[in-house]
């Protein structure tokens, strides 16, 4: 292991080099090959690996620290050879400068700029060896980082033959609390059935609430599903808190599941039954049109809160947005987004009968 990682603390290493680190490789005594492709990007290839290729992403929003700490602990255990891998795994810390600053983002919300929405082509990437230099040249480092993360995910999946079991799990915590503490956003699958195996897998660690998206998106999980045919989710694991202030007893089941996934330990799941889940679809999105946009409910309202029909949810320069039908619930309200971006989603329950496999 290189001297810069002598303490096996890849998170501290990443935060010390938030913009760029040159690629380096080394092999652990147990035969696991370790490739650092960039700051916050480390790929592990065990000597003998199974049929899964797993991407574990955290820190796409820099202040969502619990998933970062979970992944950092897994990486440390791998480097110290306390955890023996049985699958290939790529760990990504998405936005190191924002992590250092304790902010969701420095300038741009990265989860709005995947699937090419960053509009940075390969030529620009080749000419900009670091995000810091790109920023000096007038480019958004967060958009550049999205483009680079896409490259790293593509490289990871393309290093082995197609037809293997691919997964991209993008781990987050939410700005606010939730009626269902842990939930997942299942990206749009363009008519393909939702995976019962994946739904029951995550239910085994307490994630049994799913928002089933019905349209394409620019999120990292949609990129993984659409571009690489991976099982992919945006996983919301609780409320965002600063580093060191997370109660990890609340994340223990998730951390254990991730450990079992990458080490090949047995995972016990139940047969799929829709009644074991809370399933929602997006009824409509409310976008911020002007700087006058305001939310008309308390700042501590939780995700999945329902309101009576006719309740005013938001105002935007003369426009009032009201609850239109019974059962509508809000999710991800945020008045601070940029003009033109989504300020909240309204969701409603959905049945998946006949649409799973």
Image (cartoon, helix red, strand yellow):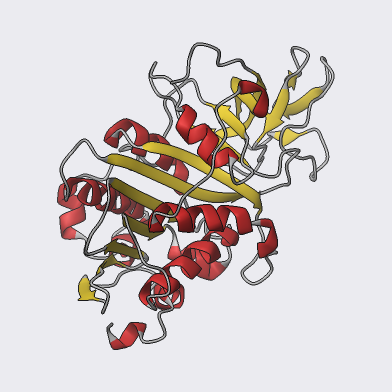
- Kindly identify the residue that appears in the image at 58 percent across and 29 percent down: 211
- Percent coordinates x, y for residue 87 in the rendering: 31, 55
* In the foreground, 337 or 39: 39
Quarter in which the N terminus is drawn: bottom left
- Kindly identify the residue that appears in the image at 42 percent across and 85 percent down: 7
* In the foreground, 1 or 115: 1
* In the foreground, 290 or 42: 42
Quarter in which the C terminus is drawn: top left
Q: Is residue 338 visible?
A: no
- Percent coordinates x, y for residue 56 in the rendering: 41, 53
Q: Quadrant of residue 310?
A: top right
Q: Is residue 202 left or right of residue 176?
A: left
- Please determine whether, in this image, residue 343 is positioned above or below residue 214: below
- Percent coordinates x, y for residue 263 in the rendering: 39, 58
Figure disc tally: 0
- Percent coordinates x, y for residue 264 in the rendering: 39, 54
Q: Quadrant of residue 115?
A: top left
* In the foreground, 269 or 287: 269
Q: Is residue 154 visible?
A: yes
- Kindly identify the residue that appears in the image at 22 percent across and 76 percent down: 26
Q: Is residue 175 left or right of residue 299?
A: left
């Amino acid at each position: 292991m290189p001297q810069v990682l002598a303490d096996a603390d890849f998170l501290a290493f990443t935060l010390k080099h938030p913009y760029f680190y040159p690629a380096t490789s080394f092999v652990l005594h147990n035969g696991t090959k370790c490739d650092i492709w960039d700051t916050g990007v480390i790929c592990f290839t065990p000597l003998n690996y199974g049929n899964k290729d797993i991407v574990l992403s955290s820190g796409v929003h820099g202040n969502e620290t619990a998933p970062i700490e979970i992944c950092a602990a897994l990486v440390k255990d791998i480097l110290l050879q306390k955890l023996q891998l049985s699958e290939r795994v790529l760990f990504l810390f998405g936005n190191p400068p924002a992590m250092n600053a304790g902010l969701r983002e420095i300038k741009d919300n990265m989860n709005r700029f995947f699937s090419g929405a960053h509009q940075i082509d390969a030529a620009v990437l080749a000419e900009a060896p670091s995000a810091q230099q790109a920023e000096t040249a007038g480019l958004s480092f967060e958009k550049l980082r999205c483009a680079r993360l896409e490259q790293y995910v593509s490289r990871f999946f393309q290093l082995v033959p197609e037809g293997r079991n691919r997964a991209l799990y993008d781990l987050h915590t939410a700005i606010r609390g939730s009626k269902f503490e842990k939930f997942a956003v299942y990206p749009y699958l363009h008519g393909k059935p939702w995976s019962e195996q994946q739904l029951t897998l995550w239910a085994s660690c307490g994630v049994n609430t799913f928002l089933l998206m019905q349209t394409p998106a620019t999120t990292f999980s949609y990129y993984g599903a659409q571009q690489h045919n991976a099982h992919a989710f945006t996983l919301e694991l609780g409320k965002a808190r600063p580093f060191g202030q997370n109660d990890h007893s609340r994340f223990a089941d998730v951390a254990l599941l991730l450990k079992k996934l990458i080490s090949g330990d047995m995972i016990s799941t139940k047969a799929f039954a829709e009644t074991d889940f809370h399933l929602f679809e997006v009824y409509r999105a409310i976008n911020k049109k002007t700087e006058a946009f305001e939310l008309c409910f308390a700042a501590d309202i939780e995700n999945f809160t329902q309101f009576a029909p006719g309740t005013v949810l938001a105002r935007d320069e003369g426009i009032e947005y009201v609850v239109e039908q019974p059962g509508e619930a809000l999710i991800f309200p945020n008045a601070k987004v940029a003009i033109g971006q989504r300020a909240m989603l309204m969701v409603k329950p959905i049945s998946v009968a006949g649409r799973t496999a």
